[in-house]
Image: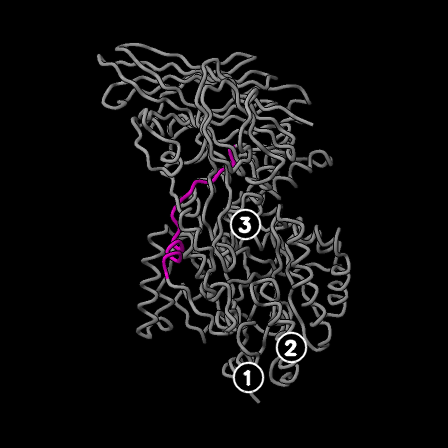
Amino acid sequence: MKKINFIFGVHNHQPVGNFDFVFEMAMKKSYLPFLEVFEKFKNLKVAIHNSGSLLEWIEKNSPEYMDRVKKLVTAGRAEIISGGFYEPIFPLIPDKDRHGQIKMMNGYINRKFGCNPGGGWLTERVWEPYLAKTFAEAGLKYTIVDDTHFKSSGLKEKEMLGYFVTEEEGFRLNVFPINAKMRYFVPFRQPEESIDYLRSLATEEGNNLVVLADDGEKFGVWPETYEWVYGQKWLERFFTELEKNHEWINVTTFSEYMTAHKPISRMYIPTTSYDEMLEWCMPADTISEYDDFVGYLKDHNMYESASRFVKGGYFKNFLNKYPESNSMQKKMAYVSSKVNKICGVDASEREPLRLLYSGQCNCAYWHGVFGGLYLNHLRFANYTNLNKAERLADEIKYKGNPWLEHEIIDIDKDGNNEILINSNYYNVYLSPSKGGHIFELDYKSRDFNLLDTLSRRKEAYHTDLFKAREEDNGKHRSIHEIARQFDANIKKDLIYDSYRRLSLIDHFLGNDTFLEEFRRNKYTEGGDFIEKEYASSLEVTEDRIAVKLERTAEVFFAKFNVVKTVTVKKNNPVIDIEYKITNLSGSQLDTRFGVEFNFGMLGGDSPDRFYYSPGRDLKDTRMISVGEEKGVKIFGIIDKWLKVDINLESEEEFDFWRFPIETVSQAIGRLEKVYQSSATLLSWKLSFKPKESKVIKIKKKVLDVR
């Protein structure tokens, strides 16, 4: 009789910072129902990986799940897979943190489930060759990747029916390929199709192995799956088929298979991930070209044979595609270096390390079929944890006393230095090479990055808005195949920014520029100050740091000099900003000079966060409001959820424009509009005589409110 081995694994994950109701929904619709069905089939085995962020929630809110999994482990029916505790993309985090995250997960599994894990889950299957050494040094014997990884090495489907061994500097690691066809069959095709496929790969020797290890959320959480998997009993029927055919399908685990079978061969796997990820990480226009090429191959029945020669991009280029992701990742690496220097055995010194690890949760660093980077609450969670880790490390370093320090380093690794000011009140990060912007402003009392923003940019899937709707053919499809649903009115919200939405952005506008033109990025900029380089110098004393930024360029064909000085004082909530603008030409010029500030306030329509201006009755105070106020001296934002009051004032009356930055992004099966931040412009209509200078002073402060 021909036989085959089959490993069935599930990977369950909810990101740090996700809403509690999402955890609860996933538990009720996927994680618990899956176990309830699986427990009935006493002859089957399963491999389970739960991320640490999910396990922490389960412990507090659904401990019965932990008990049931432990019983399966004790009965020899479940193998627990380790990994990075807070589900990091390993190539994005420092080497020391890779080891620390795996050690944390190994210890947790041993304490809670009474076993020592043999293998580690590779987050999003983002592989780089040095990870073989990382996993092996952590005591792990295997990991699991897609068959894409092996196809990139030149192998064909029937050459991957087992596992391989790779090595780095002599450290060995076994690597199992996930079967792509099974990943798309389960649970979207009838169970019999999977059984027929397994039968086609069975042999008399019975050594072949097929691995399916994929997201547990596809069993109930993904669109249309709950009714199909449980209501129409797909999962029960699938397990029934496996048990019915147990004489020739050996359902096993990774560790059991390694004990009974040797690796197929040694194999060196190139840097890669699964097919969809390699597409998502490319620029939007390149994705469209890539899709056209793949479509051509499929139309000509060439893709199946040629797919191993077709490769998309490289995961780390998400950091180029989304500079906001790069800023967060470089912040994380910077905080890691600070935290690891002070980390010790005392509980007070371990907490910064745990917060650092939680700030490495992968989901907010990239964007694919899920919201990811576009979900502001996930970015908020990462930044909050990173900022708190850094603050605690600094409090240990300075023994609780106030501090004020600065560094001049290339934190974003673009070849240009940035200026980082760190006090017990704020982090103020400035980029002289990019418009002299403030690109991060952290309020330490709340560990809150006010500049956790995201610009509006083109995505390849925006073309869906202009295609005819796909008819529902009744088939059950994976999230990669589902036609995205959207509100037809969302087309009008497609606005693309030409620069990052940060703060201290200098604009020279025509006096006839209107708010709506500015909001939609359809206006004319009179100068080139927005993202061009400013010369920088510092004045540093024990109690204050002043950064002077200067640029000379043409404004509407007249040469102008702009000097802006940002002063941060020790143990003081006020940031002083002074502009000196000089007309160097021999001609008079009338212009509207504006300074743009952006604020990432999480909830655009939430009643507990709002604009205010003393003595004025604003018609709409919401963070998503669009409005203009003339002759203002003070405006602010109060967030009662974060309990902060953000305040800007100037001695010179200004016009105050405000509008939301809302992106159009994809989530599972749909396109949606997401509030990212609120843009504000303080502007002055100025008339410059030849050689005349004007000075504008702004005070910015953030305070706690009850």
Please provide the residue range marked out in magenta.
451-467
- Whether residue 567 can be seen here: no
Mark earlier in primary sequence (3, 2):
2
The quarter of the picture where residue 558 lies is top left
Looking at the picture, tell me which residue is in the foreground, 434 or 72. 434
**Foreground residue among 144 and 703:** 703
User: Residue 559 location, x and y as percent?
Assistant: 25, 18
Residue type, numbered disc 1: Glu
Residue situated in front as seen by the camera: 47 or 377: 377
Q: Which residue is mark 1?
A: 205
Locate residue 338: give its quadrant: top right
SS at badge 2: helix
Distance in Å between CA atoms under marks 3 and 1: 42 Å
- Give yes or no for residue 457 being in the magenta stretch: yes
Q: Give the alpha-carbon distance from disc 3 to disc 2, as whole Å.
A: 31 Å
Distance from disc 1 to disc 2, alpha carbons, whole Å, reads 24 Å
Q: Earlier in the sequence, mark 1 or mark 2?
A: 1
Q: Which residue is mark 3?
A: 363
Magenta segment: does it hold 646? Answer: no
Q: Name the amino acid, label 3.
A: Cys
| 1 or 2: mark nearer the eye | 2
First-in-chain label (3 vs 1): 1
Check disc 2 and report the residue beneath it.
Answer: 239
Q: Write the residue at 72% across / 54% down.
A: 58
The answer to whether the residues at label 3 and label 2 have Cβ atoms under 8 Å apart is no
Residue 594 position, x and y percent, is 39, 24
Q: Dot 1, crowdedness within 10 Å: few (<14), some or many (≥20)?
A: few
